[in-house]
Image (cartoon, rainbow, N blue to C red):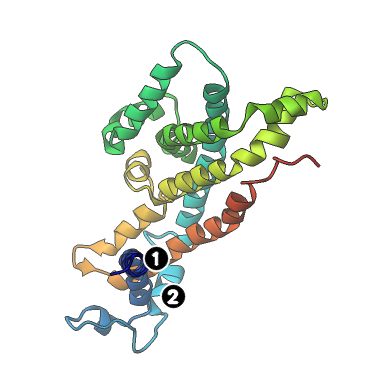
Amino acid sequence: MTPLARKRLGRILLNTAGVLVFLYAVFPVYWMVSTGFKANDQIFTTEFIPFPTHFTFEHFERVLTEGVANNSIWLYMRNSAIVALGTVLIGSAFALLSATAIARFRFRGRSTFLVVLLIVQMLPSEGLLIPLYMMVKRVGLGDQLLGLIVTQVALTLPFGVWMLRTFVAAVPKSLEEAAWIDGAGRMAAFWKVVFPLVAPGLVATSIFSFITAWNDLVFALYLMSGSEGYTMPVALQYFFGQKGVDWGAIMAGSTLMTVPIVVFFLLVQRRMVSGLVAGAVKG
C-alpha cells in the first residue's frame, strides 16, 4: 500500500469513528424527542419503533396545561432560569477577576491556590452536599433561590477560574502595555484589549456553568423544602409514581427542558468565535 493510500485509509477510518461517536452521543437526544411525540401504545411496547408512526402532542399538552405538583410547569422553568442565569453572571464575574489576578500577578501561595482548585474539582459534588447545606442554612438563605445560586457558584467557580486563567495568561502583556502607551488606563486596557480576547473562555465557562446549574437535581431537591422553589429536574421526578412511570410526560418535559440550553448555546457560540481575534487590532 502506497503512503497516499494509507493516508486516505487513515482519514476514512478517522471520519468513520467520528461519525459513530456522533451518532452514539446524539441517539439518546433523538430518542427522547421522538418518544415525547409517540402514543402510549408505541412507548410501552417491546417492538423497536425508531420513528413515531402517529405524532401526538398529548404528552406536551398534559405537561404544559396540567403542570406538576399543583404548579405550572413554567414556574419550575422560571426557577431553573433564575438559578442558571444567576450562576452564570455571578460565577463568571468572580472567575474572571480571580483568573486575572492569578495570571497577571505573583503572590505568595499562588501555586498552592492552583493545587487547591484542582483538588476541589476532583471532589464529588454530592460529598459537599451536607457542608454547603449547613452553610446556606446558617446564613439564612435556606429555601431561597439565592441560596441555590450561591451553591452552584461555589461548585462551578473552581473550573471557571482554572480555565479562564489559561486564557488570560495566553494574552501577551505587550498588548496591555501598548494600550497604556496610547493613554489608556489599566481598567480601560483590560476591558478594551484583554476582555475581548478572553471572551471565548468566558463563553465556555458560561456554558459549563449554565448546563451544570440547569441540570442540577440533588442540591435543588435538598435545599428547597417547598415545591414552589423546585427547578425542572426536581419537577420531572414527580412523574415517577407508585403505579408506574409516565415516560411520555418525562420525555416531553425533558425535551422542553433541553430547549433553553440549545437557545443559550446558540446565543453565545458566535461570541466564542468572534472573540478569538477581537481586540488584537487597534481601532
Quarter holding residue 248? bottom left
Q: Residue at x 32, y 66 (%)?
A: 6
Q: Residue 62: x, y in percent?
A: 40, 73
Q: Is residue 229 shown to the viewer in this render?
A: no
- Mark 2 surroundings: few (<14), some (14-19) or many (≥20) residues within 10 A: few
Q: Quadrant of the N terminus?
A: bottom left
* Label number found at residue 253: 1
Q: Of helix, strand and loop, which one carries label 1?
A: helix
Residue at left offset 79%, top offset 27%: 184
Tell me, for residue 61, which label it has, or none.
2
- In the rendered structure, the answer to whether residue 240 lies left or right of residue 204 reads left
| Relative vertical location of residue 251 with respect to residue 38 in this rendering, above or below | above
CA distance separating discs 1 and 2: 10 Å
Q: Nearer the viewer, mark 1 or mark 2?
A: 1
Coordinates of residue 257 in the picture (x, y in percent): 43, 61
Tell me the element at label 2: helix
